[in-house]
Every structure is written in C-alpha cells, then in structure tokens.
Image: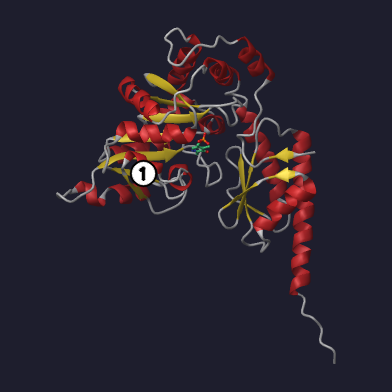
Amino acid sequence: MIIDISSDNVTQPTAEMREVMLQAEVLGFGVPEDRIVARLEELAADLTGKEAAILMPTGTQANLVAILSQTEPYQEVIVGPDSHIYEQELGGAGAIAGVMIKTWANPGIPTVSVLQNTIQPSYRFPTIASPKPALVCLENSHNASGGTVISVEKMRELCKVAREVVPKIHLDGARIFNAAACMQTTVRELSEGADTVMFSLDKCLSAPFGAMLCGSAETIARARRFRRMLGGYIRKVGILSAAGLVALEKMKYRVAEDNIRAASLATRLKAIEGLVVDPYPVPTNLIMINFRALGVDPQLFVERLKKEYGISSHIYGRYMVRFAIHRHIGPKEEDHIASAVEKLVLIMRSDLELDRKPVRQEQ
Ligand SMILES: *Cc1c(COP(=O)(O)O)cnc(C)c1O
C-alpha cells in the first residue's frame, strides 16, 4: 500500500469531475460564451462575498497577482515570516511586483499586538523617508504552523488594526474551506475583512488544477491584465473549469471529513511515547510532528517511513514532519499510518539508545 500524505494536492479528481470534463464544451481563451469559466468565477465570488473572481493556474500566481493588483513598485507588503508568500514563493513579490516585504516578528498567525507592533512605528508618523505600506497578507488556515486558523472575530480584530494604516488586506486562503469547516462558519464570513481572497481548487477540493482570486470588480479587472502579463491565461480552460465547478459545488463541505480524520490520527500519534504533535488538538487537516525532543532525525524518519512502510510525508523546517490528510485517507490508511509511525519511532528510539550505551572497556 502506497500512502501519500506529503501534501493534500495529491488528490485525484472525482469520478464526477472526470465525467464533466469529458462532456465539457471547450472554447478558446477568454471567449465570452465560455459559460463554464464564467460560472466558476461567479460561484467563487459568491462564496467569498466579493464582487468578482478570476481563475488562476496556481495559488502562487494568484498571490502574486493579488500583490501586483493592489500595490505600486517600491511600496511595502507586510506578511508573516513563515507565510507561504514569504517562504515558498521565491521572492516573486520583490522580483516582479517590485515591492518591499516586511515580516512581523513571530511565526504563525499574528496576535493583534504583534501585527500592531509591525505596522505602527514607521507609518503612524511618516517622514519623507518612510516606506509606504500598501498591503497586509494573512493566511487561513496557516500552513507552516500546522493548519492553525483565524476565527471570524480574530480576523475582524486583525483587519481593524491593519486598516488603521494599511489600505489593503489580502487573505491567502489556500485551505480556507478546511478553516471554515473547523470553525463551523462560512468562507464568506472568514473573507469579510479582506479585500482579496485566494483559495486552491486542487488541494482538499480535489480538482485537477486551479486557484481562485476574488475581490472587487476593479481589482479583479487589474488582476486580469496581470495574469495576462505573467502568461497565466489558459486556453481551452473550460475542460478544467468544469472540474473546478464540481469542486466548489460538491466538495466544499466534505473537507470537514479530512479535518476529523486528521484529529483522530493526531490523537493516536500523540499517544506514541515521545512523539510531540504540535499544535494539538489538530485544528484542520494538517498534522505537524515535532521531533526535537525525541532526538530522532526527522529526515531519516521521513526516508524510512517511505521506504519501509510506503508512506510519503513531508519534512518541514529542521524538526518538523507534516502529514497532510485528504480524501484518499480513509480508516484503513489511518490505521496503517498510526501503526507504522508507532513501530518506526520505537525502532529509531531503540537505535538511539544503543548508540548512547557506553562501550565497555576491557579490564
Ligand atoms: C499551496 C499553497 C499556496 C500555493 O498554491 P500553489 O497552487 O501550490 O501555487 C499558497 N498558500 C498556501 C498557504 C498554500 O498551502
């Protein structure tokens, strides 16, 4: 059995997605009669409570276009130090949008005071030399901190503080449906304070491709030009959009199952002696295991888990291993993962003890 929990972007399209793709009308790029793309964009706008939306090839490009559309070169964009935008998008904001990036001090979702301390000092009393803040980017759920979430109330507080000095807010909501399921709220409510929202179609929603960027009609009109500039328009995209529509119509609530499965697996993992699951309880579909206390090398753990147990996972930073739970992880897979990790941790720990035993000297 091969189990891939290295990411939730490994999901296969559903049978219905494959069926609608077979049937889909395929038109050229930007043909106004392309009702499938138009419907997908309308639906995304409606789900996030924004005026308009645009289909993007990837979340990374959607984040970049959100930045391009809401800033001018040399202005400042404020992000988290371990945000996807900062850590995994290769400085596109600087290289292509020409903005300066400022990060707040602490990893994860910022507290109100952390955000306040980041955005206040130079902007409150600007001099001729002060940077001009243009955009704050938040992330919900927050990938690097183990799928932690921003509640509707917290979002309101953060946006209020941000808006005192920064005109625009972008929400990287790659996994916003998992966040909504976790807090039993709607994507619309979680998007309320943000000017633009990005979410992925191809992670837990299982579409073969795509991300949506949603915002005001004016911003999305700008986004269309920047998508063109980046070569992010896709011809004959109706065939893929048809699957995207199934993702939005049929899959958005079932991601709750992934959160529940992750919570259950995390509880079993946490019961393994020496294993630290952090955060615990697991809020959404991502499980982070911290190997620091255990002393086991996470790199070796990931390699052996794959080679000996057929489980593909993802190393994160120096001490963390991430398991991403998705539609293909059912009760059987959960059992296999739990027992494989238990065995492997036991083996790797006893190897360590052997290493530590002093070699007895001949008298
Ligand atoms: C996956 C992800 C992205 C980027 O999406 P891609 O489609 O892989 O480019 C952005 N932000 C977060 C939080 C993500 O998890």
Quarter containing the C terminus:
bottom right
228 and 164: which is toward the camera:
228
Q: Is residue 144 left or right of residue 362?
A: left
Bin the neighbour count of mark 1 within 10 Å (Cα to Cα): few under 14, some 14-19, many 20 and up.
Answer: few
Q: Is residue 177 above or below residue 322?
A: above
Three-letter amino acid code at the position of disc 1: Ala
In the image, residue 138 lies at what x, y percent?
41, 39
Residue identified by numbered label 1: 95
- Residue at figure coordinates x 58%, y 37% from the top left: 284
Q: Nearer the viewer, residue 321 or 234?
A: 234
| Residue at 26 percent of width and 39 percent of height | 164
Judging depth in this view, the residue of 281 and 140 nearest the camera is 140
The image quarter containing residue 160 is: top left
* 222 shown above or below 112: above
Relative image position of residue 112 (x, y in whole percent): 37, 45
Residue 152 seen in this snapshot: no
What residue is drawn where x is 61% and y is 29%? 256
Q: Position of residue 84 (x, y in %)?
A: 47, 43
Point out the image quarter for the N terminus: top right
Residue 326 occupies quadrant: top right
Q: Residue furthest top?
A: 33
Q: Quadrant of residue 360?
A: bottom right
Outermost residue, bottom direction? 363
- Residue 302 visible in image: yes
